Amino acid sequence: MSSPKKPRIALIGTGGTISSISLTETDYVDYPETGRKLSVEEVITQVPILAEFADLVTIPFKEVGSSAIGPDDWLCLVTIIENTIAADPSIDGLVILHGTATIEETAWFLSLTLVVPQPVVLVGAQRPLNTIGSDAQSNAIAALRVAGDPQSIGRGVMVVLNDEIHHAREVAKGSTYRLHAFNSGAFGPLGVIDPDRVIYSRRSERQEMKTRVAFRVTMETQLPRVDILYASAGMDDTFVKASLAAGAKGIISAGFAPGLQSPIERAALVQASRGGTIVVQSTRVGSGRVSRRLWLTREGWIASDDLTPHKARILLMLALACNGSPEQIQHYFNTY
């Protein structure tokens, strides 16, 4: 009896802990500065068992820590993924090896911009590839299994770590060093990866509402500057002024729950918004919604719903790149 056909998976390397080699087997701390990042081909050489789970198509991109990944890289990844699928429609799914520091931001940007039917799965690790107790190999295998599973089609961009499947919109990193570092807040993961099969328990309602991608981008897309200002007790207007002086077209106010600032900072933000800068009211706490209460409506500010400040920043960048009106931008936040 012949073995089942392996899925054809494009494996994109960006670096991160999952692609890192430490100087010692117990270095879980200093490796970002003292270790080295492997290319995607070198990762497969180090972990040859990956080829048992998929027919791999390797796509080199970068070998950096994810703190070095930013908007220009996101635009490049969109182009690379769409061009890869156009050139080889036989690819069943895509896996992106990525550092955990910004994995949720890259995933969210791709979720808002990609137009491909295949599953796209981002995967990282909390411990370098060669260290004792590393999660790099198991996470990479889990990601390949998810990307190659027919159940994953139509579920959007996902993040896989610690045998859990998370939607790009909902996932958040909640620990610096723990292996179980990622969660989806009140919603919980979309599913799990068990030894025998991939099991989904729910879908993202926001993904179901997104019948088509809202934002089309190219390498030439100009993403405007959007800054995040975190509220603190007694905060003055210094950071608002600095943000405007730097050319910010939008500001995310990561305010006190459920969406407040100190009086001085609020006055500065009001002045900024009346001068044409889009202000989105978010919150610095880790869960819960910001609703568009009467004061926000009167001032023309946007309510972030339950998006974290760094994900609200990405949505606002894309909305401003499309020259969205405040009403249209609020619709995006309500919908996506």
Image: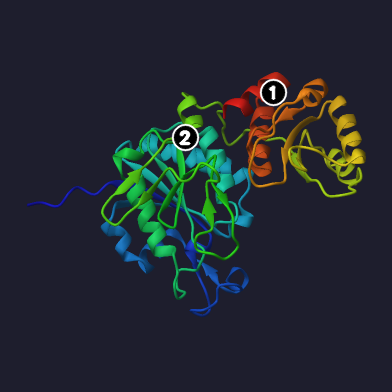
Question: Residue 106 sits in which quadrant?
Answer: top right
Using the image as rendered, state which of residue 310 and residue 38 is in the foreground: 310
Location of mark 1 (residue): 323
Quarter of the rendering containing residue 329: top right
Amino acid type at mark 1: Asn
Q: Is residue 335 visible?
A: yes
Q: Find residue 204 and name its label.
A: 2
Mark number, residue 89: none
Q: Is residue 145 left or right of residue 16?
A: left
- Residue 98: x and y, percent? 51, 54
Q: How is the image coloured?
A: rainbow
Task: Point out residue 219 in the picture as x, y percentages from the top left corner.
Answer: 58, 37
Q: Residue at x 66, y 37 (%)?
A: 312
**Secondary structure type for disc 1:** loop
With 112 as the anchor, is 164 left or right in this view?
Answer: left
Q: Amino acid at mark 2?
A: Ser
Q: Is residue 18 left or right of residue 175?
A: left
Mark 1 Cα shell of 10 Å, populated few (<14), some (14-19), many (≥20): few
From the viewer's side, name the closer residue of 226 and 132. Answer: 132
Q: Which class describes the residues within 10 Å of circle 2: few (<14), some (14-19), or many (20+)?
A: some
| Quadrant where the C terminus is found in the figure | top right
Q: Is residue 222 visible?
A: no
Q: Is residue 73 above or below residue 216?
A: below
Q: Position of residue 249 (x, y in %)?
A: 78, 33
